[in-house]
Amino acid sequence: MLKFVIVLSFIACAFGAAIPEGLLPQVDGRIVGGVATSISSFPWQISLQRNGGHSCGGSVYNSRIIVTAAHCLQSVSAASLQIRAGSSYWSSGGVVSKVAAFRNHEGYNPNTMINDIAIIKLSTPLSFSSTIKAIGLASYAPGNGAAASVSGWGTQSSGSSSIPSQLQYVNLKIVDRSQCASSSYSYGSAIKSTMICAAAAGKDSCQGDSGGPLVSGGQLVGVVSWGYGCADARYPGVYANVADLRSWVVNNSNAIRKCEETITIKDNEIFNQITFTCNMFKFVILLSVIACAFGAAIPEGLLPQLDGRIVGGVATSISSFPWQISLQRNGGHSCGGSIYNSRVIVTAAHCLQGVSASALRIRAGSSYWNSGGSVVSVASFKNHEGYNAKTMVNDIAVIRLSSALSFNGNIKAIGLASSTPNNGAAAVVSGWGTLKSGGSVPAQLQKVDLKIVGRTQCASSTYSYGSEIKATMICAAASGKDSCQGDSGGPLVSGGQLVGVVSWGRGCAAPKYPGVYANVAELRGWVSNNA
């Protein structure tokens, strides 16, 4: 019942059929047929990192702005992101700069992958040198067959959970949009006007290093976006067409540079001074401050905050939470999860957007996300088909491991709740979420004790969520404590059973905004059927 990415690619290659409608494109990162290179040959290349682990590529547009893919910036906050520039190695050297904010193209669609482009604003400007340079944006798409190259740190083979430490590149040929959508290939109508393709026999970016640069004629012509299979003659790599999206990048980058200002909000002796960039950018931190200070309803259409912080909690041992796992992307902690059985993990659907199984692994049986216990690669995953990234309804997913876990005192399954706990029931949430906004991920597992806030109460006038709280959600809170979306995807436990999956919220330990969790009792049937 799980839609394996690998199986999907194999079927497409074997039968030459169009990919079934409604299945997401494959957006992982592999450089196939390429060679190691130096950053001095690709000085515009950066490593975009989540919680210290390489996540995506990107290109230096100017000293403060990075161009990347919108799919790289789903379900993440700026606080958990940084970039490394000026180094051939994603894990060392060069310059590390924190991310102040980002903006995804408002027309981005994760189902069709149209408008898959985004810009990132850095907290400090880059100093240009021979290994850090900006690259110009193409003003027109290169001709069919034009020489191009793509670079990045994507894994080098399908199914690999490790990434090369040194920058890789591969030479390709442009396949223009009309050619890529023609009967010469198998994409057909999936290729849209904001896309361009590139390929070479036995070589591919295989969606390169997602968000990374496709360069032709010394200009940025594409942003690594998606594709099917890997170095398959019928399925070239697909990129966001920079020439078509150039004006969006220019206009939004200029808006950042021109409109920066500082405001101070005062309410009930709370002072919060933050820097923000016009009202074009809906910063999560600004949104949270306004919500906390004024108790106002969040404007319609703004995405929930999905980062991870354990506030008011304490360090703990995995033996107290043996069902807890660390879900990792390219070696860095990404989300939490819970052991359902020896082969299946329960987590949040928002944790598995814009990623393929080959970039994921889990660590179980350790109090530390970066050492000890057992590390197992991910074979496949399935998100709830009713998951909605705007409303956060049905925010649950199951992961299938490539090999079975061996149960012991530190690795155990947890049962799913068959009924929702009562309002006020004791609960506990655990994870490795950062301890404060903008902080780093703690090495040791954290936990915080909370009280259940029933769905009816959470949607009532006592709190400020109102109709945003749906039937598949449950809340939990305690004075001065919060999961603050805890460790996204991680366990909310009550009565020894899994009652919630950390999902979303507003602010952090704000009395008007409890943490919101996927209600396991409501979603139990889906998990059981798909596990």
Image: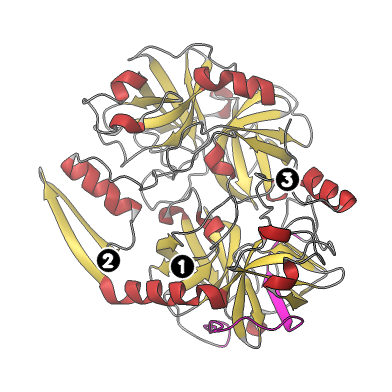
Mark 1 and mark 3 residues within 8 Å of each other at the beta carbon: no
Cα distance in 3D space between marks 3 and 2: 41 Å
Write down the residue under mark 1: 119
> Which kind of residue does numbered mark 3 sit on?
Pro
Q: Earlier in the sequence, mark 3 or mark 2?
A: 3
Q: Which residue corresponds to the image point at 38% horizontal and 11% vertical from the top-left?
A: 422
> Is 493 situated left or right of 372 in this image?
left
- Is 515 situated above or below 416? below
Write down the residue under mark 3: 20
Question: What residue span does the magenta drawing correspond to?
Answer: 130-155
Write down the residue under mark 2: 278
Mark 2: which secondary structure?
Answer: loop
Give the mark toward the camera: 3 or 2.
3
Crowd around label 1: few <14 · some 14–19 · many ≥20 (10 Å): many
Viewer-side residue, 56 vs 443:
56
Cα distance in 3D space between marks 1 and 3: 31 Å
